[in-house]
Amino acid sequence: MNRREPPSILYRKPEEKDGSEVWRLVRDSGGLDLNSPYSYLMLCDMFRDTCCIAQSEDRIVGFVSAFRKPADEQTLFVWQIAVDGGLRGRGVGRRLLRELSDRKENAGIRYMEATIGPNNIPSRSLFLGMAQSLNAECTMASKYESGLFPNQEGHDDELLFRIGPFDREGLLNIKSQRTEEIHR
């Protein structure tokens, strides 16, 4: 397989049974905060409409967890994106976000947010690229300072990235781009 040609990947809603494998994917990513196995079971079970799995054959190779903000239903907050090390830089993360924004359950979303550490260049690039493909603005602001995290964590400050507003026309633009990618 050529580096530019990703394997056949199915993008789908998670199921409860995916929780353990998602936990392992995040653990093995090496750069993400690892949550409890229980949290991944709950995300896969109770937040199916705002989470997405990338699966190659019988293996989970990507996962995005997100939720609609309770105080702002027009905003999808992206909690984590994990992609198998062998597939990073090949569009899997962006496609996971596209899949979420295409779902009918998420039709009212006009903004997408995430907190990203200053050294997380791949996530910064992903969000800036997503904003560009949506023809939407991406703003950045300080969100969670390192002092809010337990001392033993040694956690960096987190910046809030906010994409939007975007509309269904912007999402249709993404679908059109995806069709062009498929036919190249």
Image (cartoon, rainbow, N blue to C red):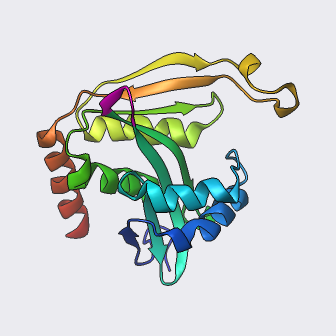
The image shows residue 78 at horizontal and vertical percentages of: 46, 41
Q: Nearer the viewer, residue 49 or 137?
A: 49
Q: Which residues are magenta?
A: 69-74
Q: Nearer the viewer, residue 106 or 2?
A: 106
* Residue at image coords 40%, 78%: 8
The answer, for residue 78, to whether it is visible in the render is yes
* Residue at image coords 24%, 68%: 182
Residue 81 lies left or right of residue 77; in this view the side is: right
Q: Nearer the viewer, residue 108 or 92?
A: 108
The image shows residue 102 at horizontal and vertical percentages of: 24, 53
The residue most toward the left is: 169
Can you say whether 170 is above or below 163 in the image? below
The image shows residue 74 at horizontal and vertical percentages of: 27, 32
Q: Is residue 96 magenta?
A: no
Residue 98 lies left or right of residue 125; in this view the side is: left
Which secondary structure is most common in the magenta stretch?
strand
| Figure disc tally | 0
The image shows residue 160 at horizontal and vertical percentages of: 50, 24
* Residue at image coords 26%, 29%: 136
Can you say whether 12 is above or below 91 in the image? below
Q: Quadrant of residue 48?
A: bottom left
| Quarter of the image where the C terminus is located | bottom left
The answer, for residue 89, to whether it is visible in the render is no
The residue most toward the right is: 152
Residue 122 lies left or right of residue 52; in this view the side is: right
* Residue at image coords 15%, 55%: 176
